[in-house]
Image (cartoon, grey):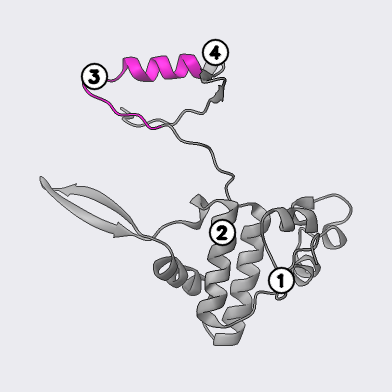
């Protein structure tokens, strides 16, 4: 039985609004629980984009080339050094043990992910590539993908996602 569930809704004029399907699922979930519960309410933040993630892996490739390391190893290293770990409790043979797990970049907001990439630059001293280089190499680039396929790699989206080049400028704001 599931003991934790996430629901999304909208708040307007101090009232919680959600569709009938969500209300039904929430009602079924609540009826499956007994005893004390907790709930959290928070604002939904925009998660990092596919373009940001593609840019990040391209940048890791640049760092790997420069340092002789593997991009996957660098990814794991940077997560452990630059992101706060997640602590979870596991139970083995009746004994509770707290374990430390590296954070995931998937959970970062667009702004947090941009800051994470800038921290990597500060740590390594390897400049963040210009977005134009990324677009020229990216399979999501209109020139590579052909037409509008993969427009998620557009300069406008990269700028909105907070990805900057060496100058700190975005394509929209030189």
Instruction: Tell me how far mark 1 sits from mark 4, CA to CA.
Output: 45 Å
* Residue 54 painted magenta: no
Q: Is residue 10 left or right of residue 156?
A: left
Earlier along the polypeptide chain: callout 3 or callout 2? Answer: 3
Q: Nearer the viewer, mark 3 or mark 2?
A: 2
Please give the label number shown on residue 113. 2
Residue, disc 4: 20
Element class at badge 2: helix
Earlier along the polypeptide chain: callout 2 or callout 1? Answer: 2
Earlier along the polypeptide chain: callout 2 or callout 4? Answer: 4
Residue, disc 1: 165
- Label 1 environment density (alpha carbons within 10 Å; few <14, some 14–19, many ≥20): some
Report the residue that reaches farthest toward the left: 94
* Residue 38 painted magenta: yes
Instruction: Tell me how far mark 3 sits from mark 2, CA to CA.
Output: 39 Å
Residue, disc 3: 34
In the image, what residue occupies the spot 57% across and 76% down?
Answer: 121
Report which quarter residue 112 is drawn in.
bottom right
């Amino acid at each position: 039985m599931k003991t934790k569930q996430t629901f999304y809704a909208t708040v307007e004029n101090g009232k919680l609004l959600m569709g009938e399907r969500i209300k039904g699922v929430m009602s079924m979930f609540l009826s499956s629980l007994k005893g004390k519960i907790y709930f959290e309410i928070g604002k939904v933040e925009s998660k990092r984009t596919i373009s940001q993630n593609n840019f990040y892996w391209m940048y890791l490739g640049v760092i790997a080339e420069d340092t002789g390391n593997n991009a996957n190893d660098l990814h794991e290293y940077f997560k452990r050094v630059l992101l706060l770990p997640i602590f979870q409790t596991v139970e083995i043979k009746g004994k509770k043990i707290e374990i430390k797990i590296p954070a995931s970049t998937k959970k970062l907001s667009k702004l947090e992910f941009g800051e994470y990439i800038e921290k990597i630059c500060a740590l390594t001293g390897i400049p963040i590539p210009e977005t134009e280089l990324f677009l020229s190499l990216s399979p999501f680039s209109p020139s590579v993908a052909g037409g509008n396929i993969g427009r998620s790699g557009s300069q406008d989206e990269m700028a909105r996602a907070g990805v900057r080049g060496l100058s700190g400028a975005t394509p929209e704001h030189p």
